[in-house]
Image: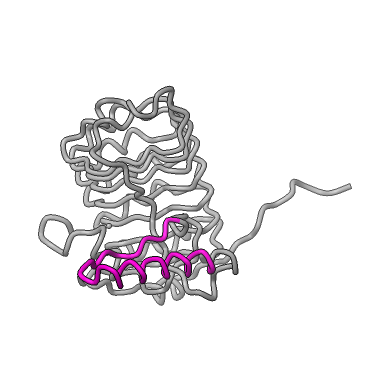
Amino acid sequence: MAKGKAKGPKGKKITLKIAKNSIRITLDGGRRLDLSKMGITTFPKCILKLDDVDELDLSRNMLKKIPSSIQKFQKLRWLDLHSNQLEELPEAIGTLQNLFYLNVCNNKLTTKNLPEGLNLLKNLHILNLGLNCLDSIPTSLGALRELTEIGLFDNALTAIPNSVKKLPKLKKLNAERNPFPDSTKQVEHADSIKRVEMLHLVQEKDLCSSCLKMCMDERDKLNKLMNVTPSCLKKPSFPLLLTPNSTAKDNQEEWRLRDNLPRHSTDHVP
């Protein structure tokens, strides 16, 4: 007869030394603590001693909970928790008043476990709630007046509150693949719907043969188009790589800062 309950995966233990060695300097001079893809199952308490970082990446792990002690990261402006197993967020997340970018895509969040503290993130510009278990969006998110992008794709939403659709600075709203009664009415406020998931660039060796062939075919089509109209300098688009579980390229800072984040300034210290 088995003794006790079955335990989940133990996960990798993060020491303070490992955490310190995982700090990188971003192009705008900030400090980024990157603990993504580390097999972490429990929030490493040791990183609370590094609470002066500007960016924290805990994505693509197996975290089930973020503790209230996250509030110690008062300088944080960029927080990535995507692709974990989070069922809730702590109320204390609302104390991170410098937060510019928050990605909790691809978790197990439910509407009832979205903390009211989210409404206090007055400097938040980008919020990704896609690929979760949300059946509604709190109208109180309309208090986030600085939001320019919000991802709500792949949930169980049947409506989007007007308070969210009519946010004054909202430019991108992705609500694709939700069971809306009339999906066209849900996005009529936005000029166009664009994907706001994280884009992870991958090397050819990380792609399966079929995906690699598809990407190469797209590249060939792009090259033909550019040969016909050489003055066109459009960037290549690889929609099939817009998945939160893609293997990330090591040096993502340049494209992320260029496309998603503001330069280092006195106003905001993603």
For image coordinates 26% across by 54% down, the residue present is 74
The image quadrant of residue 146 is top left
Nearer the observer, 61 or 162: 162
Queried whether the magenta region covers residue 47, the answer comes back as no
Residue 193 image position (x, y, % from top left) = 31, 42
Queried whether the magenta region covers residue 223, the answer comes back as yes
Q: Which residues are magenta?
A: 212-239
Residue 197 image position (x, y, % from top left) = 39, 51
For image coordinates 41% across by 48% down, the residue present is 104
For image coordinates 28% across by 70% down, the residue present is 254
**Residue furthest to the front:** 228
3 over 159 or under it: above or below: below
Q: Quadrant of the C terminus?
A: bottom left
The image quadrant of residue 22 is bottom left
Residue 44 image position (x, y, % from top left) = 47, 60
25 over 144 or under it: above or below: below
109 over 236 or under it: above or below: above
Display colour scheme = one colour
For image coordinates 41% across by 60% down, the residue present is 238
Q: Is 62 on the left-hand or right-hand side of 267? A: right
Q: Is 154 on the left-hand or right-hand side of 145? A: right
